Amino acid sequence: MNRIYKTMEPSVVDEQMLQKAVEEQGPQDQAGRIAKEEGIQYHEVIQLRLDYRNILKIDHLWEFTSLTKLQLHNNLIEKIQGLEKLINLEWLDLSFNNIQVIEGLDTLVKLQDLSLYNNYISVIENMDPLKNLQIFSLGNNLISQLDNVIYLRKFKNLRTLNLAGNPVCKEENYTIFVAAYISDLVYLDFRPLDEQTRQKAFTQYQYAIEEMRHNDLQEQRATEAQKNNEEELQLHKDAFVEHLNGSHLFDSMYADDAEAAKLAYLPGVATLLESYQTQLVALCVQIFEVGLTQHTCRQNEMDAFFTGFQDAVADNQQRGAEIAADFERSRRQVMAGMQQAANNRLEARISNYRDEITQLCHTLMTLELQLVGQLEDITKDFERNISDMVGGFIEYVQGLFVQCRDLENHHHEKLLEIAVATLEKVAKNELEEDLPDDVRLLFVDKDTAVSAVSASHDTHLLKIDNREDELMTRINSWMTALIKSIHDEEIKRNRKRISEIHNYVDYVREQLEELHLQEHQ
């Protein structure tokens, strides 16, 4: 295995290194000057090259959330880490480093091209989330087990694989094995897999492959079922009514009720409980169904709002771009005319052009002010609509929870009647049912029996109250956070737009002043 050993002192990715790299690799000339004045926006960087820098540890990359390509090859990196926030990464090069374990890639779900060439990796693992992987280079590592290659079957988009230089390549059936188990592979170790190799691979491993495909299909079905369940649960959570489409609330009320299990032995309680459960579940299902319906209504309202909001911004930006384009065409003509104008006419032209620049700034600022007012109106309408929706939902649900409490109170009264009747029978030694000893202890006197029934009742009411409070708190918090995020994003948009206008106006003014100075020299 060929290695390149670095003699420089190891370094860590820090703010200074990142700023220098972004400046060197970013836009130059006027665009670069404006970028420096505004401050480097790491979240807007698309590609970043940090190769040949003797980096020992990856760090400080959390702001590069838009990054699609990252080059970290030819460093001293020992551990894959610090990449969690790079969720848009599609291309990652970590070749020629000192990495021993594949890890730290869980959030890189968009990754298509991964190079770990020339490291010290002995096991292919920890890559399950990389469903979009198409190209994987793992040559010149320490992969020695042929069966480990089977792990790559799960990457259905994988078309190019490089394992050249690993001990596993010395296995007699290496190429045939890989072609058999990764049947959609097009290139292996820089060479295309021909039809003859594929046919030989299929013949030699046919039965093993068929069994594995059967297992894969079962696993896929189980995974899809789990995914569907998780998506359904998430929908219910987004509607704030998860676990209300069944007996979950009823079951939770009795799960923490030590007295209820004893009281269930009393004559007539089983029938009473069955009726209670049926009615309570019916109320929960009503809450669940109206919750889903209201969630859909809220989602539709949000979609309409954001569409209208974005359309208004896009229309305003288009108008602003047209104004700027017209001015830019005029500016070039004016600047060319000034360079040819006589000195006695130049001052007048410069003065007129300054007025035009001021007017441009005023026009663009007025346009932005109009947009701000338009967006404020759109946002106020949305806030009123969403508030009415949430308020109406809360009011309806509170009414159903009142019915749940009424149902519990009715059940409590019936249970108390049974308990008192049982107490009287026990006192007269007329109880026909054979009760367990711990149940009989509840009926040593009236206070004990009533206390047991009341404790059970209090537990049930607390569960109902808690579920109602949870729903109300969460939906109100969601609405507050949503409205706040809308206002925060609009403030950021407005500040950015104003900064863009000022930067452009400053630029054209600087161009004018440079021309003015040249004429006086």
Image (tube, rainbow, N blue to C red):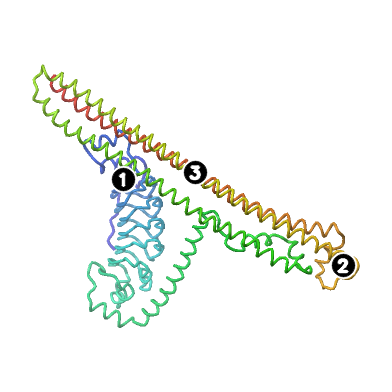
Q: Which mark is residue 425?
A: 2
Quick one: label 3 or label 1, which is nearer the N terminus?
1
Number of the label disc, if any, that sits on residue 481: 3
Image location of residue 305, percent across then percent down: 41, 45
Q: Is residue 38 or residue 333 the one in the foreground?
A: 333
Q: Position of residue 445 (x, y in %)?
A: 87, 60
Does residue 512 sit above or below 128 in this rendering? above
Q: Nearer the viewer, residue 368 or 332?
A: 368
Evaluate if marks 3 and 1 touch, with contact meaning CB atoms under 8 Å apart: no
Lateral position of residue 147 relative to residue 298, left or right: left
Whether residue 109 sits left or right of residue 238 in the image: it is left
Depth order, front residue of 374/88: 374
- For the residue marked with disc 3, what is the amino acid? Ala
Disc 1 marks a residue whose amino acid type is Val
**Looking at the image, do the residues carrying marks 3 and 2 touch, with CB atoms under 8 Å apart?**
no
Residue 111, above or below 354: below
Is tag 2's residue or tag 1's residue first in the polypeptide sequence? 1
- The CA span between labels 2 and 1 is 82 Å
**x and y percentages locating residue 102 in the rendered image:** 39, 60
Q: Is residue 54 above or below residue 228?
A: above
Disc with the residue nearer the chain's start (3 vs 2): 2
Q: Secondary structure at mark 1?
A: loop
User: Where does label 1 land, which residue?
Assistant: 45
Which numbered mark, 3 or 2, is in the foreground of this view?
A: 2
